[in-house]
Image (tube, rainbow, N blue to C red):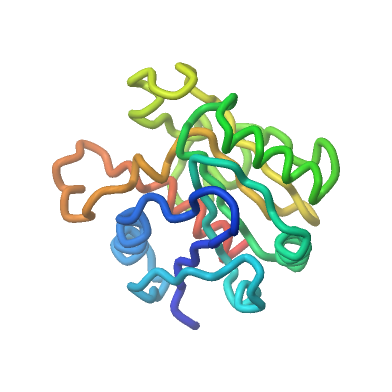
Amino acid sequence: MKPFVFTRIQYTSGDWDTDQRMPSNLLHSLVEYTTIPVDQKEQVVQLSSPDLFKSPFCYLSGHKLVEFSQHERDQFKRYVQNGGFVFVDDCNHDIDGLFAKSFEQEMDRTFGPKALQKIPNNHPIYTTFFKFPDGPPTTSFELNGWGDDLVHDYLKAITVNERIGVLYSNKDYGCEWDYDFRNKRFLAEDNTKFGVNIITYALTV
């Protein structure tokens, strides 16, 4: 089995380079809880690059405008329709923010209106490894009242052949998990466990 590589998507608009410590934190969790072999180094792949198709899992994030070029749009669509998985996280944790609005509009352009749909809180992604009976775990950023002052009680997804191809979060998991993994020992509960579920789902379903 080839080592899992955490792949971040670089796109031409906005700011794609967020949550610098998050990938190594999630990789540490994969090592700690699973038998999945991992490459310890994050890789960055341009959305327009054919290298995108070498990664079964990709991460896309930002705070600002998301507006793909036509080539980027075609690549993104082909990657997802061919079985790729993209976890997209809004760093603003705000449904009215620029990233959220522009990303959802981009998904409408790429996959058609209403392709991005709420997923139920009993979706298999919430039980793929750890159990989350209430759906997506809440982040401290939501509880602090930042962003739009809401706790988002669902995630959205684009489903291809009964499998999630794009998982979309307004909850800002990227910032929630953006800390040195050695500080996990100070937490009452490891808050990266849902990240393990996301990656396990992407690799096994």
Instruction: Name the residue: 49% across, 67% down.
Output: 7
Q: Residue furthest bottom?
A: 1
> Between 131 and 194, which is closer to the camera in this rendering?
194
Instruction: Name the residue: 37% across, 59% down.
Output: 23
Q: Height in image: 31 above or below 164?
A: below
Residue 145 position, x and y percent, is 38, 18
> Between 104 and 87, which is closer to the camera in this rendering?
104
Instruction: Name the residue: 37% across, 50% down.
Output: 19
Q: Quadrant of residue 97?
A: top right
Q: How many labels does the image show?
A: 0
Is 129 displayed left or right of 205 in the figure? Answer: left
Q: Quadrant of residue 181?
A: bottom left
Residue 86 position, x and y percent, is 60, 56
Residue 34 position, x and y percent, is 38, 64
Is 106 displayed left or right of 179 in the figure? Answer: right
Q: Height in image: 1 above or below 32?
A: below
Which quadrant is home to the C terminus?
bottom right
> Between 98 and 40, which is closer to the camera in this rendering?
98
Q: Residue furthest right?
A: 112
Instruction: Name the residue: 69% across, 38% down.
Output: 104
Residue 55 position, x and y percent, is 57, 72
